[in-house]
Image (cartoon, rainbow, N blue to C red):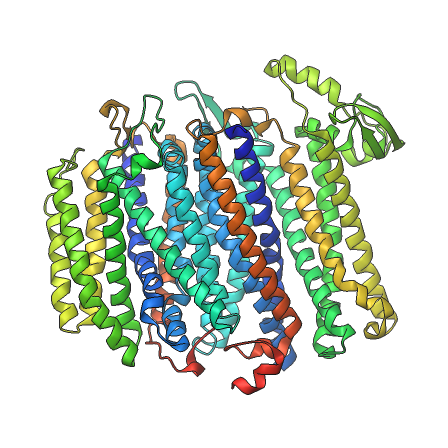
Amino acid sequence: MSYEFLQILWFILIAVLWIGFFFLEGFDFGVGMLLPFLGKKDEERRAIINSIGSVWDGNEVWLLTAGGATFAAFPHWYATMFSGFYLALFLLLIGLIIRGVSFEYRSKDSAPAWRNRFDWMIAIGSFLAALLLGAAFANLARGVPIDGNKMFTGNLFTLLNPYGLLGGLTTVAIFLLHGANFLGLKLEGELRERVNAFAKKLWIGASVLYVALGVFTYVAGFWARGVVNPGIIPIAAVAVLLVAGYFINNKMEGWAFIMVALNIVLTQVTFFSMTFPNVMLSTTNPAYSLTIYNASSSQYTLTVMSIVALIFVPIVLAYQGWTYYMFRKRISTDKKTLVY
Amino acid sequence: MDPITLSRWQFGLTTIYHWLFVPLTLGLGWYVAFFQTRYYQTKDETWRKMAKFWGKLFLINFAIGVVTGIVQEFQFGMNWSEYSRYVGDIFGAPLAVEALMAFFMESTFLGIWIFGEGKVSEKVHLASIWLAAIGSNLSALWILLANGFMQAPPANSFVYNEANGRLELVNFFALIGNPKGWIFFWHTISDGVAMAAFLIIAVSAYHIVRKQNLDFFKRSFNIAAVSGLIAGVLIFLGGHTMGQYMAEVQPMKLAALEAIWETEQPASFSLLTIGDLSGKKEIWSIRIPAAMSFLACNNFTCEVKGVNELQATYEQQYGPGDYIPLMIVTYWTFRIMMAFGVLMILITAYFVWANMRGDITKAKWMKWVPWVLILPYLANASGWILTEMGRQPWIVYGLLKVEDAVSPNLTTVDLLISLIGYTVVYGSLAVSMVYLMKKYAIAGPDAAMHESVDVAPARVGSQD
């Protein structure tokens, strides 16, 4: 396999890992953020957590694998991005830490104050993670200051520009909607009614923000700065989001979920194609941008990693898919069926 | 304080913290899987309770290990970007494989184990805990192979690419066949089993003294004592093998952990050495003749190189600089690790012997036994501090120094924010974790069987 083919292959693989991560962890971030607002009674909150209980940790591994794969296949991308976005990633990590522990600990004590504290930590952690990931990706699309030594020369405030913030908020809104749709599929009874009512409102907010982000991207010229024109994909992304509104209003939960999921996937496809073959655009000088060619590992390493991925990715997909199939039933708030 | 010092403190603190939880996850998973297998085979309710009760403690511990692990993976790029650029072509691969092969397996099957009881068949439920245990131990293998590269990079696994200014992988099998990584793995997974054994011993002793659930805790205690003894001996043999390999690939670390200043043949083993405040000069010591030669090469006559000679050699080889690790740390952590490790073997051997001789539940010493839990934790932390600080000033032994590996864009303020942030969050997590561990450990197996609401024994009956 030629070196260039491998570099493109690994770019696609990393894009797939991020798409998988946003699609899967997207709804469990949304569920986490909705938790204290949606669940009024303790059993309700537990039922909400149970809906993602068996899968959230596996979903998060998509992020770890994306990180590990970036390190292995594009060390300069990993080094520049992770050191450059230092404080943003630090906050992301804090969000992921408090959230992950809280899922496990919140029901291990019956004091209402204890449970409430951990419920809020789940919500805040999920919010922080969604906001920062969205802001980070928006900044990657916008470009960041990088010098001739592949070094990030900004700071946290460089990332807090209007486009970055809008990207963060839009991600939060889309994930909230995605989470609400997921819960519509997993819950039953009064809680299901409540979450479907939430979804209607969330859809309006998410659509407004999403369209604003799209317009901003186009007007500011953050558009198709690589060799690929994403073409109709972003238009399709807007379309499926709007269509989702129809399904949400007509209580067609399955279709609503699929449409928002498609929106997330198509948005990510747009993101990865509109800068390709750049992986980090430099606002200092376009010549300093990191690309799949100047940021990648050696041909040998990419070959080895391709073989590893070829063996393990199908196995992982098979057993993760099987888990979702196994836990496909709706979750009731009946105490006897809940897992604590 | 400068960013390098702060980055080193942060890496040290977050890594030690992470490693307070991981060995227990590695070891306790096997016990839970074993107990559940025994239940599956015999349908004896006590085995089921054992799987449930020890499984509960396993999960409380697991939660912190897993979330602090994310920090570890991100930290290489965040704080050590120049390291990531220089060796990413080699070092990234085992990390990616770890995520793909082990993390997915561990997290997915643990999810099935927690949430699947009654929803999946008994066989699938049993298989899921085994797969979760295998997954977590596999992740240890890959990260230790990665660490093995930092400690003793196999010469035939990489080349220096002048055009790119970095090291590149040329032989993946040399990387994953690195003896250093495999010795680490042996040492670490047996350490995990020992740590789990000591937790089981400590908690069981607490209940045995109070005559609660004697059948349950006696059985747990005995299994843990026997397996803890075997694991202790395996750790010791792994450590001894490591010492000999170290003599070959990291002679400076070996000399530093022993405070050998001048090359000796045969080399003596220091029982106690007092250095001056800089930690770099010996004032007074007591030594056992020739014992160090045995530790380094299995005979009583070989030469062990001293710190001063090695320093001179390295200056010639790598240019001027200080190549001596902080001796006061390497010397004492080695002694703490050794002393506590040997103590763990002796204690478990005594438990096994006492159990063969008579009824341990009546033993007077039992009330002191819960305190043994501190031994594996201190031994483990000391061992890792020794391993990592003994490598200084190198981040990759002989190839890249720590001072050249740090992210150049980070400021003191950045690092103070993250260091203080991690400390506060990790500290409060530790408080919740210790609280829950104590509560569940004390509440005992009957409470652990009642999944819902609360475990305080007085309230369990009234709840459902």
Where on the picture, by quarter, is residue A141?
A: top left
Closest to the observer: A158 or A8?
A158
Residue B231 appearing in the image: no
Q: Residue at x 37, y 79 (%)?
A: A333
Quadrant for the N terminus of chain A, please. Answer: top left
Residue A154 appearing in the image: yes
Q: Residue at x 43, y 48 (%)?
A: A93
Where on the picture, by quarter, is residue A227?
A: top left
Where is residue A279 drawn, in percent x and y? 28, 35
In the rendered view, tell whether residue B180 sits above or below residue A106: above
In the rendered view, tell whether residue A295 sits above or below residue B55: above
Closest to the observer: A210 or B159?
A210
Report how many numbered discs are placed on residues in the image. 0
Where is residue B406 drawn, in percent x and y? 49, 29
Where is residue B327 drawn, in percent x and y? 72, 30
In the shown orientation, is residue A236 left or right of residue A40?
Answer: left
Q: Residue at x 79, y 59 (%)?
A: B348
In the shown orientation, is residue A297 left or right of residue B318?
Answer: left
In the shown orientation, is residue B326 left or right of residue B1?
Answer: right
In the shown orientation, is residue B332 left or right of residue A77?
Answer: right
In the rendered view, tell whether residue B25 sits above or below residue A90: below
Where is residue A78 drawn, in percent x and y? 38, 36
Q: Residue at x 72, y 67 (%)?
A: B223
